[in-house]
């Protein structure tokens, strides 16, 4: 089963940067919730 491709596929590097940003945001939210 192939995962459906997003409507617009950014270059690998840009995609990785976006993933890192989302991960950082999630971590920040978790830290705020813990505190």
Image (cartoon, rainbow, N blue to C red):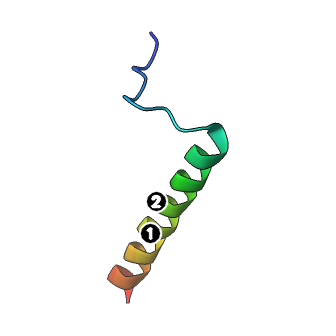
- Residue 29 placement, left or right of 22: left
- Residue 34 placement, left or right of 11: left
Residue 3 horizontal/vertical position (percent): 43, 20
Estimate how packed mark 2 is, as few (under 14), some (14 to 19) or many (20 or more) residues with alpha carbons within 10 Å.
few
Count numbered badges in the picture.
2
Above or below, comparing residue 35 to residue 2 in the picture? below
Residue 1 horizontal/vertical position (percent): 44, 9
**What residue is shown with label 2?**
22
Residue 28 horizontal/vertical position (percent): 45, 76
12 or 3: nearer the viewer: 12
The span from disc 2 to disc 1 (Cα, nearest Å) is 5 Å
Q: Are marks 2 and 1 in contact (CB under 8 Å)?
A: yes
Residue extending farthest to the left is 33
Residue extending farthest to the bottom is 35
**What residue is shown with label 1?**
25
Q: Residue at x 37, y 84 (%)?
A: 32
Q: Residue at x 46, y 59 (%)?
A: 22
Above or below, comparing residue 12 to residue 34 in the picture? above
Local secondary structure at mark 2: helix
Considering the image in quadrants, where does the C terminus appear? bottom left
Q: Which mark is residue 16?
A: none
Residue extending farthest to the top is 1
Above or below, comparing residue 30 to residue 14 in the picture? below
Q: Residue at x 59, y 55 (%)?
A: 17
Residue 7 horizontal/vertical position (percent): 37, 28
Q: Residue at x 51, y 68 (%)?
A: 24
12 or 25: nearer the viewer: 12
Estimate how packed mark 1 is, as few (under 14), some (14 to 19) or many (20 or more) residues with alpha carbons within 10 Å.
few
7 or 23: nearer the viewer: 7
Above or below, comparing residue 20 to residue 35 in the picture? above
Local secondary structure at mark 1: helix
């Amino acid at each position: 089963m192939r995962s459906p491709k997003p409507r617009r596929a950014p270059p690998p590097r840009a995609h990785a940067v976006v993933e890192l940003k989302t991960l950082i945001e999630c971590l920040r939210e978790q830290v705020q919730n813990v505190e």
